[in-house]
Image (cartoon, rainbow, N blue to C red):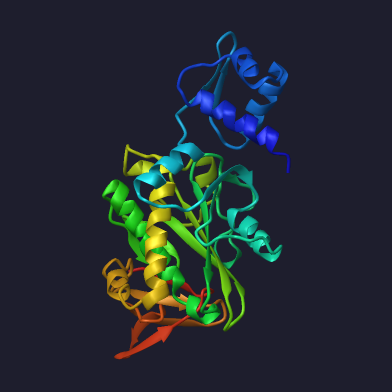
């Protein structure tokens, strides 16, 4: 994929993000391309769902500023956290998870802690084959590579550690207390804020490669939200100090810390922490695989990261990334 048009789109957005109208001629001069090319990029950005006003004689203006990624600013935030992870920024990608998995399968020499973030995903994925809404510049599309020497079996509870890392980052930056829904969702005030998708490649007992995908709603436009089939929220609805670059750095730092603990002691120190922020704690819930369903009171997770239900006075644990958990309607 040619990155030059992507880079030009990003440069146009950065210019418009300063506020006010910017003329097509000024943009053309800055980027060294024709005014016709600028007009084409603007139309393309509008088709991506970005609200850009066009006014004859004045040029172009964003309806509201967008939280845009900036690699240098991310590195500055990482340095302030004493975090040395490498972060790569891409304007448009099919999927950050897909790209890192592709590199693993091609034998690329990835270093644990490598982060890939993008402004837009054209084929974003959630759990169970769902589409993850990924409009340009609106949300955070983030993937983290981690090599686990202990093998696939040892990776069983990773999504629990990841959910706590997202909780840590949101609390550290915004003072917001999220809730965690087993196995992969982050809620705020009863609505979905973020999701996790962990993908694995490797052997049962040999080294395995993990790609940890995280999508966080930051400033979801109405054009994208109409495709979401459950109650949702975004960070812009809860804070006015939204800085996507600081969030990338804090999330990376929180993940590195949680994964370091996980590698040493698994979920031993995290079970109680997770259960304290369990979105469905003590609620009647239904588990479903599509073929079978189970009902019970949600007690939290066990030491392996399975969900524990109280059924007829007995505690039973259930495992598997393809299980859907829903709170029963009252």
Q: Quadrant of the N terminus?
A: top right
Residue 219 visible in this rendered orientation of the protein = no
Residue found at x 26% / y 49%: 175
Please provide percent x and percent y for residue 69: 49, 39
Dividing the picture into quadrants, the one containing residue 279 is bottom left
Dividing the picture into quadrants, the one containing residue 91 is top right
Residue found at x 60% / y 60%: 110
Q: In this view, does 323 lie above or below 12?
A: below
Left or right: residue 38 compared with residue 225: right
Q: In this view, does 310 lie above or below 109?
A: below
**Is 248 or 327 nearer to us in this picture?**
248
Left or right: residue 202 compared with residue 63: right
**Is 88 or 194 nearer to us in this picture?**
88
Q: In this view, does 98 lie above or below 316?
A: above
Q: Residue furthest top?
A: 57
Q: In this view, does 206 lie above or below 98?
A: below
Residue 325 visible in this rendered orientation of the protein = yes
Left or right: residue 316 compared with residue 32: left
**Is 291 or 251 nearer to us in this picture?**
251
Please provide percent x and percent y for residue 4: 69, 34
How many numbered discs, if any? 0
Q: Quadrant of the C terminus?
A: bottom left
Please provide percent x and percent y for residue 285: 38, 75
Residue found at x 55% / y 26%: 52
């Amino acid at each position: 994929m040619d990155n030059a048009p992507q880079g030009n789109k990003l440069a146009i957005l950065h210019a418009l993000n300063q506020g006010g109208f910017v003329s097509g001629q000024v943009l053309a001069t800055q980027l060294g391309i024709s005014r016709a090319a600028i007009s084409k990029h603007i139309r393309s950005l509008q088709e991506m769902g970005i609200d850009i006003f066009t006014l004859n004689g004045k040029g172009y203006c964003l309806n509201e500023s967008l939280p845009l990624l900036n690699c240098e600013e991310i590195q500055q935030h990482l340095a302030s956290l004493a975090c040395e992870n490498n972060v790569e920024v891409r304007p448009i990608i099919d999927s950050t998870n897909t790209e890192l998995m592709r590199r693993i399968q091609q034998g690329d020499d990835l270093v644990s802690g490598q982060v890939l973030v993008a402004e837009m995903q054209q084929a974003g994925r959630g759990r169970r084959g769902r589409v993850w809404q990924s409009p340009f510049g609106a949300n955070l599309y983030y993937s983290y590579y981690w090599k686990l020497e202990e093998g696939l079996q040892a990776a069983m509870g990773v999504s629990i550690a990841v959910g706590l890392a997202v909780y840590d980052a949101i609390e550290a930056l915004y003072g917001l207390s999220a809730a965690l829904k087993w196995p992969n969702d982050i809620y705020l005030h009863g609505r979905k804020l973020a999701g996790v998708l962990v993908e694995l490649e490797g052997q049962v007992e040999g080294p395995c490669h993990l790609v940890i995908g995280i999508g966080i709603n930051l400033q979801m436009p109405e054009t994208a939200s109409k495709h979401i089939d459950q109650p949702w929220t975004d960070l812009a609805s809860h804070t006015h100090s939204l800085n996507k670059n600081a969030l990338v750095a804090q999330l990376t730092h929180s993940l590195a810390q949680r994964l370091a603990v996980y590698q040493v002691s698994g979920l031993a120190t995290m079970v109680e922490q997770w259960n304290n922020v369990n979105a469905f704690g003590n609620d009647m819930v239904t588990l479903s695989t599509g073929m079978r369903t189970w009902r019970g009171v949600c007690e939290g997770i066990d030491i392996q990261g399975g969900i524990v239900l109280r059924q007829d006075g007995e505690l039973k644990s259930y495992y598997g990334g393809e299980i859907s958990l829903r709170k029963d309607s009252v």
